[in-house]
Image: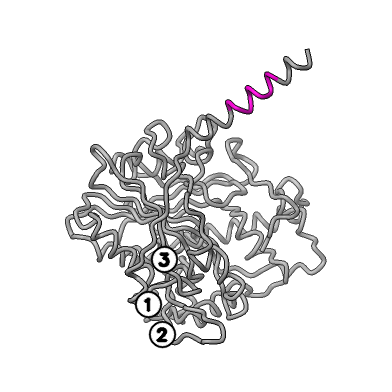
C-alpha cells in the first residue's frame, strides 16, 4: 500500500510540474551590444538585455514591452550592492526566462496578447530607466545610464520590426510599472503616429505617504535616487516644470499629465508599499510589524486600522487619474505585488476578480475598446478571490 501511495504522489508531482511547464515558455536572452557605444549600459558597464518571444499569426505586428521591476538604488553604497547582481549587470542574468501571464504564448492563458511580439526588458540600472550621468567614477565603475538604456532598447526593437507596429503596449511591474508611467508619453512619441499605443502599470503606483513613525521615508529615498542618477532631465517636463524633480517620481504627480491611455493594476494594500513605505525597518526598530508584513493574517487590529488608513491615502492619490474612459483601473483589496506576470493572478479559474472580471479580461477589454474598466475593490478582507502574499521570515523585506 505504501508503494501505491508513493506512486500516486509521484504522479501528482509530475502532473503539477507538467501543468506549470504548460503555462510557461522559456525565452532566451538577447544582449544589446550596440548600446555600449552609446553609453547605454547597466550599472557595471555591461550591455542591456531583453528576452524576445516572436509574434505570430494575427499578432505579428503587435508589440508588448514588459519592463522588469526590482526596486532602486539611491546612493553609491546601495548601487554598489546591486552592481554585481542581475539588477546591475547583464553578466549575472539568467539566459532563459519563463514567460507566463501577460507574456504567455497560449490563448487559454493569455487570450488577447498570446500571439503578440512579447518582450521582457531586463532591469539593471536602478533608476526605473531614468538615469543619465556622463561621468563614471573609476573607483566604483558605476554607470548611471537608465534613460539611455531605455532609448537604446526601444531603438533596437524599432529596427527589429516595431517601427511597423499596429498595436503596442508599454507595461511593467513594480519599479518597471513606475517606468511604464514615467515613460508612457515618451514611448508613444517614439512609435509611428498610426500605431495604437497604450500603457499598463502593474504595482507601479507608489504613493508619497508617511511611515508609521511619521517620517517622509519614501520621499527622502526617491530624492536620493533622482540625485544619484541624474534623473531630473528625464522625468516628464510637464511635472518638473511645476515641482521639485523628486516629486515627479511619484505617479500621483504625473498621471494626470499623461496624454496616452493608461491602465493601472494595483493592490490597495500593495505588499511592497506596506513593507517599505508604510512600515520600513528604519521606522520599526523593535520589529513590531515584522510578522504582519510576512502575512496579513498576522496583523493586529491596530495594524489593520493603520493599513486601512494607508488604503484611504492610496485611493486619494488615485484622484489625479481622472474619469476619462481612456484610463483603466483594477484596484483590488489584496495583499499582493505584481499580478500580471503570474498566471495565477492574471488568468486562471481562481484568479482575483472585480465585478466578476479577471485582470486579463479587464485589460484586454480596455485595450481593444470593447469595454472600459474602472473598478476599486471594497476594503480588506471583503474579496475572497484575493491571492494574498505570504512571505518567509528569511525573505528580504526591504
Q: Where residue 16 appears, x then y in whole percent? A: 58, 29
Q: Mark 2 = which residue?
A: 134
Location of residue 165 with respect to 226 vertically, above or below: above
**Residue 167 location (% of width, % of height):** 25, 49
Query: What's the distance in space between the residues labelled 3 and 2, CA to CA?
Result: 17 Å
- Number of other residues with Cα within 10 Å of mark 3, as a class: few under 14, some 14 to 19, many 20 or more: many
Residue 39 marker: 1
Look at discs 3 and 2 and give the one toward the viewer.
3
| Mark 1 neighbour class, 10 Å CA radius: few under 14, some 14 to 19, many 20 or more | many
Mark 2 and 1 residues: CB-CB less than 8 Å, in contact? yes
The majority secondary structure of the magenta stretch comes to: helix
Tag 3 secondary structure: loop
Residue in view at x 39 percent, y 75 percent: 235
Disc 3 marks which residue? 48
Highlighted magenta segment, given as a residue range: 7-15
Secondary structure type for disc 2: loop
At horizontal 44% and vertical 87% (from top left) the residue drawn is: 135
Amino acid at each position: 500500500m505504501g508503494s501505491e501511495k508513493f506512486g500516486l504522489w509521484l504522479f501528482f508531482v509530475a502532473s503539477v510540474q507538467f501543468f506549470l511547464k504548460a503555462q510557461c515558455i522559456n525565452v532566451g536572452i538577447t544582449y544589446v551590444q550596440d548600446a555600449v557605444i552609446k553609453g547605454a549600459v547597466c550599472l557595471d558597464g555591461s550591455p542591456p538585455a531583453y528576452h524576445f518571444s516572436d509574434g505570430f499569426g494575427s499578432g505579428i505586428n503587435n508589440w508588448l514591452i514588459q519592463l522588469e521591476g526590482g526596486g532602486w538604488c539611491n546612493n553609491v553604497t546601495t548601487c554598489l550592492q546591486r552592481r554585481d547582481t542581475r539588477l546591475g549587470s547583464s553578466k549575472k542574468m539568467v539566459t532563459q526566462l519563463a514567460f507566463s501571464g501577460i507574456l504567455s504564448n497560449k490563448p487559454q492563458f493569455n487570450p488577447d496578447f498570446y500571439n503578440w511580439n512579447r518582450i521582457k526588458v531586463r532591469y539593471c540600472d536602478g533608476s526605473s530607466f531614468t538615469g543619465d550621468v556622463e561621468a563614471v567614477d573609476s573607483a566604483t565603475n558605476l554607470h548611471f545610464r537608465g534613460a539611455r538604456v531605455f532609448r537604446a532598447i526601444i531603438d533596437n526593437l524599432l529596427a527589429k520590426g516595431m517601427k511597423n507596429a499596429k498595436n503596442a503596449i508599454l507595461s511593467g511591474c513594480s519599479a518597471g510599472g513606475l517606468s511604464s508611467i514615467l515613460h508612457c508619453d515618451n514611448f508613444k512619441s517614439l512609435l509611428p503616429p498610426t500605431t495604437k499605443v497604450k500603457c499598463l502599470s502593474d504595482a507601479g503606483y507608489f504613493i508619497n505617504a508617511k511611515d508609521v513613525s511619521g517620517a517622509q521615508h519614501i520621499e527622502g529615498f526617491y530624492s536620493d535616487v533622482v540625485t544619484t542618477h541624474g534623473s531630473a532631465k528625464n522625468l516628464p517636463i510637464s511635472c518638473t516644470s511645476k515641482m521639485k524633480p523628486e516629486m515627479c517620481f511619484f505617479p500621483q504627480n504625473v498621471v494626470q499629465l499623461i496624454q496616452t491611455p493608461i491602465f493601472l493594476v494595483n493592490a490597495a494594500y500593495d505588499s511592497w508599499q506596506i513593507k517599505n513605505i508604510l512600515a520600513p525597518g528604519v521606522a520599526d526598530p523593535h520589529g513590531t510589524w515584522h510578522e504582519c508584513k510576512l502575512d496579513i493574517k498576522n496583523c493586529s487590529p491596530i495594524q489593520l486600522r493603520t493599513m486601512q488608513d494607508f488604503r484611504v491615502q492610496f485611493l486619494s492619490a488615485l484622484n489625479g487619474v481622472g474619469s476619462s474612459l481612456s484610463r483603466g483601473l483594477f484596484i483590488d483589496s489584496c495583499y499582493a505585488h505584481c499580478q500580471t506576470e503570474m498566471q495565477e493572478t492574471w488568468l486562471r479559474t481562481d484568479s482575483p476578480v472585480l465585478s466578476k472580471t479577471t485582470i486579463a479580461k479587464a485589460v484586454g477589454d480596455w485595450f481593444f475598446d470593447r469595454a472600459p474598466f474602472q473598478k476599486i475593490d471594497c476594503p480588506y478582507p471583503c474579496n475572497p478571490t484575493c491571492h494574498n502574499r505570504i512571505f518567509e521570515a528569511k525573505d528580504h523585506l526591504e
